Amino acid sequence: MKLPITVINRSAVQYIDEYRKKDLILALSAELKKISSKEITLMEVCGGHTMAIHRFGLLSLLPANIRLLSGPGCPVCVSSQHFLDTAIAYSKIPGTIITTYGDLIRVPGSNGSLEKEKANGHDIRIIYSTLEAVDLARENPDKKIVFLGIGFETTAPATAASIVEAAKAGLNNFFVLSAHKVMPPVMKALVEEGVKIDGFIAPGHVSAITGTEIYNDLAMKYGLGVVVAGFEPVDLMQAILMLVRQFESGRPAVEVQYQRVVQGGGNKIARELLSRVFEPKDDRWRGLGMIPLSGLKIRDEFAEFDAERHFNIHVPESSEPKGCICGSILRGLKTPADCGLFASRCTPADPVGACMVSGEGTCATYYKYRS
Amino acid sequence: MCLAIPAKVITVDGASALVTIEDVEYRASLLLLDDVHPGDFVMLHAGFAIEKVDADEAAETLRLLNEIADNSHQ
Ligand code: SF4
């Protein structure tokens, strides 16, 4: 007996379909228009949120007094030029295989990109999971495998797990170049810098790992609302409604809209793994500069897996591409329309800056959904 | 990049699980999550299951949302 394909699909997209229902989205829009009276500026920190907001056309469903700013939550976009230049330098060392998540290979460095080095014959491979890089190390004992670790608290545990697995397997040819970053310091830095924000739509999957405690300061010390949100249109509309309710009543708090995935305490196994393998360090963000304790460094216990300590290659400091205002966009101070290169010199096919490369970069999102 | 997608667990095999998203099969490492069983939904991120989807919480959220929707129709 053949099942109708739609029936199969129905059950297969559970936890997605329900949160894309038009009547719910419109009802939330109507409710927002009813209760929102004051001017309010909210920042969606996560690039995945920026993408969903534009993909589902949510801006047109908000009353005019609600303004959304895109934040610094696109890992590819905030990885520094220096990190990229270092990765490119490693790729030229004979006998190395560079492994990376897809987007990164197209980001322009000071001189060329990983993609260009790949075309030049250097061994650069896109992987889906860090464990593939560990397998590569196992299968190629005569090669050195470098994984380029980028991403926030969502992604860093997978890197930590790969290092622990490599240690267990006794591998001495697996290395990580860590540009992993953590969210709370950059959110605070933006507020302290004076970017006008009344509340944060906080990243759902980062929070699934960290729990919600990391946001308490923002609510208590800075008086800002923080609502952890999922990534479907209903999730985002509901999160905005929750933030507006807090704002209208003058009671900022940390709340979770994404209850189905985020538990208050986060994922204990992932958190323990993170702090076992990494420790906080001051780190450089593209366009934002140095932010104290915003990055993750491999602990001494796992030093043998740290690419920086192993290769001991230092590339010069670099400047960001001329005319690119990615930094101000990541801070929510400007939008892509303010950039003279947007959609002319800079397009997804030929990007000038990192914000145009990643699918969830603000410039790439604006380009794709520009009207 | 922090994208994670709900995936249904089909079988569990030590530290990894076979999961499906829209009928496509994937391997999910369970190094970051324990107590996973066939029939559960997990959030799949870069080859790792990073958290379970809580069916009760999901139902509660939907109940709340439907309440808002019903009120706005009145
Ligand atoms: S459009 Fe291109 S050049 Fe302009 S800010 Fe965005 S990434 Fe940079």
Image (spheres, coloured by chain):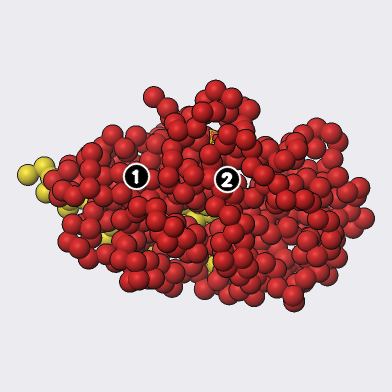
Chain colours: A red, B yellow
- Amino acid carrying label 1: it is Leu
Tag of residue A138: none
Is residue A17 visible in the rendered image? The answer is: no
| Marker count (numbered) | 2
Q: Quadrant of the C terminus of chain B?
A: top left
Q: How crowded is mark 2: few (under 14 residues within 10 Å), some or many (20 or more)?
A: many
Instruction: Tell me which chain the residue with mark 1 is part of.
Output: A
Describe residue A247's horizontal placement relative to residue A161 as left or right: left
- Amino acid carrying label 2: it is Cys
- Depth order, front residue of A197/A355: A197
Q: Which residue is drawn at 22% across and 48% down?
A: A39
Is residue A170 visible in the rendered image? The answer is: yes
Q: Mark 1 points at which residue?
A: A68
Quadrant position of ligand 1: top right
Residue A358 lies in quadrant: top right
Q: Residue at x 83, y 56 (%)?
A: A313
Beta carbon at label 1 within 8 Å of ligand 1: no
In the depicted structure, whether residue A275 falls above or below residue B66: below
Q: Look at the numbered disc 1 and give the secondary structure of its residue.
A: strand
